Amino acid sequence: MKGYDELVRSAAERIREILPWDLAKLIDSKDVFLLDVREPHEFCRLHIPGSINVPRGVLEQACEWDYEETVPSLAQRKEMEIVVICRSGKRSLLAAERMLEMGFSNVSSLMTGVKGWNDFEQPLVDNEGNPVDVDSADEMLIPKLRPDQRRP
């Protein structure tokens, strides 16, 4: 049986990863689709401008036509360059792997996720499009584990 970290390591062997500074150049130079797979409450607090939110839990249905969760702007882009984004780069690896299995041909994962993007001091916005400063974003991106979630 594989644990979460082993699944992520396995996906990293097959999925192309892109670093934050390379994503910044890519955004400036060509048409790229930014797909944030974090939960809606995470996305609302802060996200990369121009990204769309499709939570990991509905990704497969959002990628295909004829489902209540279908996201047309995603379903019609099987050939377009897509960069999948999450907080740290782990969920995005798993999501990108699934998208490749579903026939998307040009998918990569943002290594280090939104956290690395913020560390590189690239712009983040809230749900209303207001800029989120680097220090506030740092605080929002710290994992919040309860004591009962820690290994005994």
Image (cartoon, rainbow, N blue to C red):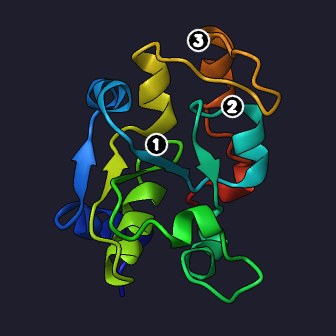
Give the mark, 3 or 2, whose residue is nearer the N terminus.
2
Residue 96 image offset from top left, x and y in percent: 38, 65
Up-down: is 112 above or below 78? Answer: above
Residue 88 numbered tag = 1
- Tag 2 secondary structure: loop
**Residue 5 vs residue 51, the one in the foreground:** 51
- Identify residue for label 3: 134
**Residue 130 vs residue 75, the one in the foreground:** 75
- Identify residue for label 2: 46
Up-down: is 68 above or below 36? Answer: below
Residue 97 image offset from top left, x and y in percent: 34, 71
Residue 29 image offset from top left, x and y in percent: 30, 28
Label 2 sits on what residue type? Answer: Leu
Q: Residue at x 79, y 33 (%)?
A: 127
Residue 112 image offset from top left, x and y in percent: 38, 38
Label 1 sits on what residue type? Answer: Ser
**Residue 15 vs residue 135, the one in the foreground:** 15
Cα–Cα gap, marks 3 and 2: 11 Å
Cα–Cα gap, marks 3 and 1: 16 Å
Task: Give the side of residue 27 with respect to residue 129, left or right.
Answer: left
Label 3 sits on what residue type? Answer: Val
Quarter of image, res 48: top right
Up-down: is 54 above or below 141? Answer: below
- Tag 1 secondary structure: loop
Q: Residue at x 58, y 60 (%)?
A: 152
Cα–Cα gap, marks 2 and 1: 14 Å
Quarter of image, res 57: bottom right
Comparing labels 2 and 1, the label whose residue is closer to the camera: 2
- For the residue carrying disc 3, how many other residues have a C-alpha within 10 Å: few (<14), some (14-19), or many (20+)? some
Give the mark, 2 or 1, whose residue is nearer the N terminus.
2
- For the residue carrying disc 2, how many other residues have a C-alpha within 10 Å: few (<14), some (14-19), or many (20+)? many
Give the mark, 3 or 1, whose residue is nearer the N terminus.
1
